[in-house]
Amino acid sequence: MQGGKGGDVVTTDGPYAETKEALTGFYLLECADLDEAVKVAATIPGAWDGAVEVRPVIDFGG
């Protein structure tokens, strides 16, 4: 799968990597499933030269 300007999209299934980078922002995406979320995340400019972490969110609201 290709995404954005970069090369191949690389996915792994946790655990999340320990990093020393600071969180500089986040996107909250509403997607039908994980496959759609990965496709959308691959288009985020930060993913072209770096990494984007995709995590599920559970809506506990009513």
Image (spheres, rainbow, N blue to C red):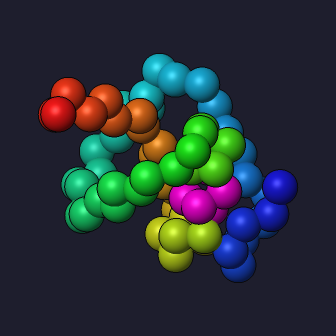
- The residue at the far left in this view is 61
Question: Is-magenta flag for residue 2?
Answer: no
- Looking at the figure, which quarter contains the C terminus? top left
- The residue at the far top in this view is 15
* Residue pictured at 20% horizontal, 28% vertical: 60
Q: Position of residue 40 (x, y in %)?
A: 59, 61
Q: Position of residue 31 (x, y in %)?
A: 52, 50
Q: Which image quadrant for residue 13?
A: top right
Residue 15 sits above or below residue 4 on the image:
above
Q: Position of residue 8 (x, y in %)?
A: 79, 57
Drawn side of residue 52 relative to residue 37, left or right: left
Residues 52 and 18: in front is 52
* Dominant SS type (magenta): helix
Residues 32 and 15: in front is 32
Drawn side of residue 1 relative to residue 15, left or right: right
* Residue pictured at 66% horizontal, 56% vertical: 39
In the rendered picture of this protein, how many numbered marks are placed on residues?
Answer: 0
- The residue at the far front in this view is 62
* Residue pictured at 73% horizontal, 53% vertical: 9
Drawn side of residue 7 relative to residue 36, left or right: right
Question: Is-magenta flag for residue 39?
Answer: yes
- Looking at the figure, which quarter contains the N terminus? bottom right
> Which stretch is magenta?
38-42
Drawn side of residue 12 relative to residue 47, left or right: right
* Residue pictured at 68% horizontal, 74% vertical: 4
Q: Position of residue 46 (x, y in %)?
A: 48, 69
Residue 14 sits above or below residue 37 on the image:
above
